[in-house]
Image: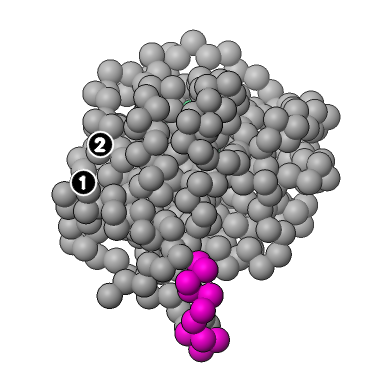
Amino acid sequence: MMDVRTPEARSTTTDAERSAPDPLVRHDWTREEAKAFYEAPFNDLLYRAHCIHRAFFDPNTVQMSRLLSIKTGGCAEDCGYCSQSAHHASGLKASKLMAVERVVDEAKRARDAGATRYCMGAAWRSPKARDMDVLCGMVEGVKALGMETCMTLGMLGDEEVARLKAAGLDYYNHNIDTSERYYSEVITTRTFAERIDTLARVREAGIKVCAGGIVGMGEEPEDRVDMLVALANLPQHPESVPINMLIAIPGTPLAEAAPIDPIEFVRTIALARILMPKSHVRLSAGRTEMNESTQALCFFAGANSIFVGETLLTADNPDESSDAALFTKLGLKPLESEPRSGEQEDAQDA
Ligand code: SAM
Ligand code: DTB
Ligand code: SF4
């Protein structure tokens, strides 16, 4: 039977019990098991996900991250959802890599508005050697503000990973985006296996992993299940799992994709929570298209992180006042700051 007691109740367990691997944290999920959760009656799925959520987290606390596009547009990859690909006519103006000072200034503003993690994204297939000094300067500058740092720069080799680790990078975001089966329907310039390789390199270097995907790209429910099983069966769960709802961008191949049913979206969040109990599940892109009730269901189903601020990388996000009003309505509070030590336990078997 699953042990879904509160953290307080769990603290009454013996040392031996506490040091044992948590049976809820598994890396051997089968597609059939996961599909059965996903397809269960909605109330059963939500009850299971919420109990697991409560066993590992304060259910009323939400971590807040802020994004900045440090290098926009002109990307060589052909990701079918993305405004920044040079292959699509999205009308986006491309720009060069920002200067360190500007990034640190923006991060300070985000920190003062309550964000605890700063995520810097670049529209690259992979960073060039000549960019590494500037990127490392950004990590050092943002860390000095007392914020957690995250970068998403595309594929990384050993050299780049080592440089970013030495600069103190806390998290690397690299999404698998969809199932291995559906991947080539969305992206043809790189493979699912290449994404997994970069994730392994990042993990090996001791940088925390942020990896998730996008739903609403015309995939089948089985693709959502397979994507989450692929993430959950990595040797260690990603510490952060962003679940993005496609923002359909005019000029991209997915501009006319049919929107995902909100209940299917909530099911996806709930399954992520069940398969990766100790990870922060982020309700990511697409919140401007979700009403408050859908977002509330996502928080109940186990989402405990969001992006804040009016812009994601290039697309809109809810403004701060509507997020503040939603938090008040739901009695949610922002996570003040992540623990600075012992945090690796977060997404691992204890
Ligand atoms: N170029 C890097 C890469 O692809 O890894 C980093 C930036 S990329 C924009 C980061 C992630 O944003 C993508 O992997 C994808 O999951 C998400 N994303 C991009 N465009 C999106 C859209 N229109 N709707 C939802 N998510 C999107
Ligand atoms: C993630 O999973 N979502 C963020 C972040 N990681 C880099 C990006 C969302 C991008 C949404 C579309 C845009 O702003 O262009
Ligand atoms: Fe480039 Fe990343 Fe956009 Fe793909 S998702 S086109 S790699 S910026």
Tell me if residue 199 can be seen. Answer: no
User: Circle 1 is placed at which residue position?
Assistant: 42
How many marks on residues? 2
**Residue 299 image offset from top left, x and y in percent:** 42, 42
Name the residue nearer the viewer: 1 or 290: 1
**Residue 93 image offset from top left, x and y in percent:** 58, 13
**Residue 23 image offset from top left, x and y in percent:** 38, 75
User: Circle 2 is placed at which residue position?
Assistant: 263
Query: Tag 1, which secondary structure?
Result: helix
Q: Which mark is residue 173?
A: none
* Quadrant where the image shows the N terminus: bottom left
Seen in the picture, residue 85 relative to 231 is either above or below; the reply is above
Residue 258 lies in the magenta-colored region: no
Q: Amino acid type of disc 1? A: Phe
**Alpha carbon of mark 2 to alpha carbon of mark 1: how far?**
8 Å
- Name the N-terminal-most of marks 2 and 1: 1
Seen in the picture, residue 248 relative to 167 is either above or below; the reply is above
